[in-house]
Image (cartoon, rainbow, N blue to C red):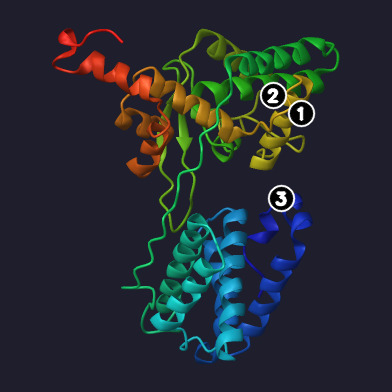
Amino acid sequence: MALPVPAALPPSACRVEPQWMAQVEALLVAARRRAPSEWNLQDASALFAEWLYTRGCQELTVKYRYVRVRCFLQWCQDATGTLDARIPDRDLLRRFFGELKANGRKGSTIEKYRSNLELFFAYLVKIGVRNDNPMDLLHIRPQVKPLPITVLRDDELQALLQTAERVYQAVPEHRKADKLQAFRDKVLLELLLATGLRGVEVAGLKVGDVDLERARLSVRGKGGGIYVKRRRTAFIDHPVLLADLEAYIQQQGGSAESPLFPSQYRTHLTSLGVRKILKRLARKAGLTRRVYAHLFRHTYCCHLINHGADAYSVQKLMGHFQIEVTLQYYLHLTPPEVRADWQAHSPLAEEVPPC
């Protein structure tokens, strides 16, 4: 039985990593021929990948979760000589995480293995392959250092915006398809800067998600199935962006269900497609640094914080499920910035002499 979703994947995903998907499909065919009581950990890993797909997870999410589970299974087979689904217990998992730490794996890597295995064993309990989740009561809490937040400088932002405008203006009017594509890239760039959307979120926007009258977007948050796909509001009440969006939607046409930023095949752009657009504009702008959608997201978030936005408002605007994710951005405030906030809001502010 083939996976239910891979047929809908973009061709690029199959070209980049064809072997893992073919491996999953082969394992599924073999597993379906046996009774559930005969399934081992290898069969379960393929069923786990299929379950993630059916729950609506992104293809890259499925890939990385499956690959990490397979890495654990390989270690488990080397350590115990078997792939019996009943064998892994807390002691064995404790050994596995101990070796990860001893081998110098980063806390973020260990945390990814922890969350993936926790979900994997919960799935085994769900389908009746195991009676318990050995990850329960296993206290693995690695120290995860927040990554340094990098942002775009004002001159880099201006260079990108000017380049997008220049490319658009340079396309002759009679080349309508190329003109519309250049306009798409320009509006996409402006939207990323104005809203801080994730690459996958801006790629998934539909024409009907844009409310020009109230100057807002309805955004589908990341995640699927095992996560709740949360909708949130993003504000676009900037005169230049609103005018460009209105003109772009009129030129593009289509129904409310049409992709706001279509690919050349008139389907939704992928996050990889968004990355390629930004990379191309950055190269034409003469920027040597790597430019990607999340860099605009960092820039947007830090701009909000530096201009006095509180953590709760930033959390809602960014679509962070946990406030702790938002607070990481506050860790990068410099001491002078923190002192300035204290001077502005302290009850004794009037008595504090200037620096």
Tell me the mark number nearer the camera, choosing from 1 and 2: 1
Residue with the mark numbered 2:
185
Q: Point out which mark residue 280 bears.
A: 1
Residue at x-position 44% and y-position 15%: 213
| Along the viewing direction, whichever of 54 and 289 lies nearer the viewer | 289
Mark 3 falls on what kind of element?
Answer: loop
Mark 2 falls on what kind of element?
Answer: helix
**Can you give x and y, in whole percent of width and height, for residue 287 in the image?**
73, 23
Residue 48 visible in this rendered orientation of the protein: yes
The reply to whether callout 3 and callout 1 are in contact (CB within 8 Å) is no
**Can you give x and y, in whole percent of width and height, for residue 55 in the image?**
50, 60
Task: Work out how far the residue at label 3 is from the one at label 1, CA to CA, in angstroms.
Answer: 21 Å
Residue with the mark numbered 3:
10
The amino acid type of the residue labelled 3 equals Pro
Residue 323 placement: quadrant = top left
Please rate how many residues cluster around mark 3, counting C-alpha atoms within 10 Å: few if below 14, some from 14 to 19, many from 20.
some
Between discs 1 and 2, the one toward the N terminus: 2
| Along the viewing direction, whichever of 71 and 265 lies nearer the viewer | 71
The reply to whether callout 1 and callout 2 are in contact (CB within 8 Å) is yes
Q: Is residue 286 left or right of residue 241?
A: right
Tell me the mark number nearer the camera, choosing from 2 and 3: 2
Q: Point out which mark residue 103 bears.
A: none
| Along the viewing direction, whichever of 99 and 49 lies nearer the viewer | 99
**Can you give x and y, in whole percent of width and height, for residue 130 in the image?**
42, 84
Q: Quadrant of the N terminus?
A: bottom right
Please rate how many residues cluster around mark 2, counting C-alpha atoms within 10 Å: few if below 14, some from 14 to 19, many from 20.
many
